[in-house]
Amino acid sequence: MLVNNLRERYSPMYFLAALGAGGLAVSFFIYPMFLLPHPDTPMVTFNHLWPVLTAGGNPLMSMLIGLDLLAIIAFAMLHFWLLAWNLREFKLFRQTTAYQKLLNSNAEISLMAVPLTLAMTINVAFVLGAVFVPNLWSVVEWMYPGAIAAFLAVGIYALRVLGQYFTRLFVHAQFDFAENNSLAPMVSIFALAMIAVGLAAPGAMSHHREIN
């Protein structure tokens, strides 16, 4: 059971719990990519999964795919539950003096966990659509501009967070090297990489030059 109204006790790094659940949901999507042939699409879709589940020709494969889809559902639900909790708690945290203190410390970089997790949310939504919506790939070209816009919005948010962080460091020289004793700052690299890959995916899969 999650504790609510943490306020001063909250940390933006708690977003990584939602990130992990989303990453597991996406990881279970990778297995059908190698288990099932999908020569007509770059990704395995509902149209490839449903015949395996219902045909009954290979009970072991049907069981594996069924368990895999259950895992995707479970971790996706956990991701959205943890995401909603974190967004609510983060809103309350921003109203506290602890948040203002965070903005003037090394821990400000932990705010990059927010765009990192939001980028993962877009990935999870795309996976859920691919494996549970019939014939989605027939209209996927219409979805690519929306995906690009979503990742651009998250990217702009991430750059704003980084911009404020580096501005404070360079202008006010407010960086405590003695307290910089963890790998937490690497969350910013992870976030930018996640957003970049998300922006590259529509270009890699689309057949329209404008998207590419």
Image (tube, rainbow, N blue to C red):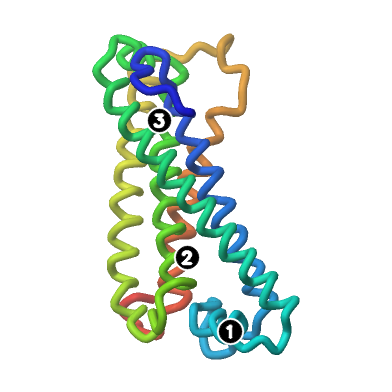
Q: Which residue is mark 3?
A: 111
Disc 1 from disc 2: Cα separation: 21 Å
Amino acid carrying label 1: it is: Thr
Instruction: Name the spot of residue 182 as percent of width and height, x first.
Output: 61, 22
Q: Which residue is mark 1?
A: 54
The disc, 1 or 2, on the residue closer to the chain's N-terminal end is: 1
Q: Which residue is mark 2?
A: 127
Number of other residues with Cα within 10 Å of mark 3, as a class: few under 14, some 14 to 19, many 20 or more: many
Number of other residues with Cα within 10 Å of mark 2, as a class: few under 14, some 14 to 19, many 20 or more: many
Disc 1 from disc 3: Cα separation: 45 Å
Instruction: Name the spot of residue 69 as percent of width and height, x first.
Output: 57, 65
In the foreground, 115 or 175 = 115
Amino acid carrying label 3: it is: Leu
Q: Give left or right: position of 79 versus 150.
A: right
Instruction: Name the spot of residue 183 as percent of width and height, x first.
Output: 61, 28
Disc 2 from disc 3: Cα separation: 26 Å
Between marks 1 and 2 in the image, the one whose residue lies nearer the viewer: 1
Quadrant occupied by the C terminus: bottom left
Q: Quadrant of residue 11?
A: top left
